[in-house]
Image: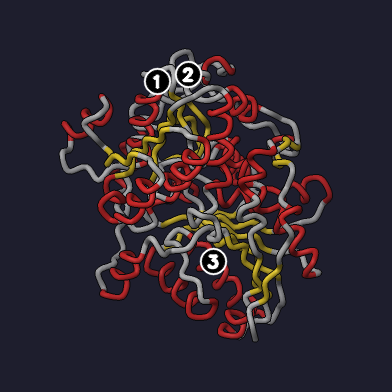
Amino acid sequence: MATIKYLLDESDTPKFWYNIAADLPQPPPPVLHPGTGQPIGPGDLAPLFPMNIILQEVSAERYIEIPEPVRDILRQWRPSPLFRARRLEKALDTPAKIYYKYEGVSPAGSHKPNTAVAQAFYSKDEGVKRITTETGAGQWGSALALAGSYFGLEIEVYMVRVSFDQKPYRRAFMESFGARCVASPSEKTNSGRKILEENPDSTGSLGISISEAVETAAQREDTKYALGSVLNHVLLHQTVVGQEAMKQLEIAGDYPDLVIGCTGGGSNFSGLAFPFLGEQFRNGKEVEVIAVEPANCPSLTKGKYAYDFGDSAYLTPLVKMHTLGSQFVPPGFHAGGLRYHGMSPLVSLLADLGFIQPRAYPQLHCFDAGIQFARSEGIIPAPEANHAVAAAIEEANRCKEEGIERTILFNLCGHGYFDMQAYTDYFSGNMYEQEYSEEEVAMALAGLPSVA
């Protein structure tokens, strides 16, 4: 039983991004100024982001047109393929139908260029010369380095130190496209130096890396900051994934009962799930949506839904999200792209309203699932994507136990070919579960900002 691929023509690359804010059952809580506690306006974000990005961040329009220069680049690999995983279905002996949207076909090997190209375009269009950013596992940094090379922009990436050490090929990829990659925390910024004074052996966190990138961007007028997940405009740009999947499933004569994605900040998950949730809100086409996070950084399942900073140095606005506290430093597990203390405000709201089911899985369980998938389908998933694979297999096994046929769709958001050290550790027995510190989370949550 062969794997079946559902392809679209490049003319089917979406012309619009879908904005779920237009269809939410209730409006999202406002973003607050960290000094005044009042809702922020576009001018408050102007030092960090291009104005078109800011307008997208606060937009309530259902569809926002994708600029043709962005579509022209996206068409190099979009639409990405949708696969029916018949070999995996056979291996599991399940009555479930399993589909996966494969984002590893992009030049950077993940879904991240979908927003990196857009953010680089808007920065270039505004006369920006330089972009700073952070990266966890290196997928976002790789994507922005690629996008920067398309538009002739200087890119500086603050990479979480544990990933900087674990993933040298990601660093080499970024440098190949002209980006500068800095281990974070670093001596380059006030926020980095402060962390190193307190803990010279700090493994870093996305919150710390964001602080360094934001601080650097704010120091120069020719520089803007770009974020790879969490914020509304990033999730907006990723909805090309779900829109394409809808067309491809229509070709297959199918529609999902379950939509699954891994979650760290929420971008690949939202890119697949939001268009389907929009169909549910507008037209009543119900779908079960599962968000899978790492058990050792469980913001959705164990975090508090509260206002918090997006970074560790309190430089960013306050957003209401599921958070473990901005001072929490997660263990150095291999799914570096999921090591963030908070979750997207939009994903957090939908989870709080009961439209998303959060789950948390340990990393060995996820790598077990990733290997089972690879040996059936021939693709080695990124460590982050293994979380979605694990949930899909769990649901397929449930279908077998209950004797029911359901259609499962998940996002294979990237391949693992830059992350083979993780698999080396897995096979050699050097991968182990790293429990997050409940004491550290309690301390971090105790320091949440007071918002009336």
Element assignment for label 3: helix
Residue under pointer 3: 391
Q: Is residue 283 above or below residue 287?
A: above
Comparing 214 with 204, the one in front is 214
CA gap, disc 1 and disc 2: 6 Å
Between disc 3 and disc 1, whose residue precedes? 1
User: Which residue occupies 65% across, 60% down?
Assistant: 259
Count of all numbered marks drawn on residues in the image:
3
Report the Cα–Cα distance between label 3 and label 1: 40 Å
Assess whether mark 1 and mark 3 are in contact (beta carbons under 8 angstroms). Answer: no
Q: Earlier in the sequence, mark 3 or mark 2?
A: 2
Residue 276 seen anywhere in this rendered image of the structure: no
Identify which residue is drawn at 60% across, 60% down.
260
Q: Are marks 1 and 2 in contact (CB under 8 Å)?
A: yes
Q: Is residue 278 left or right of residue 91?
A: right
- Give the labeled residue for mark 1: 218
- The image position of residue 149, as x and y in percent, is 47, 40
Extreme residue in the right direction: 283
Residue 15: give x, y in percent of width and height.
Answer: 74, 43
Say which residue label 2 marks.
47
Amino acid at circle 1: Ala
Residue at 44% of width from left, 75% of height from top?
Answer: 371
Say what amino acid the circle numbered 2 marks: Pro
Q: Nearer the viewer, residue 198 or 428?
A: 428
Q: Position of residue 55 (x, y in %)?
A: 64, 25
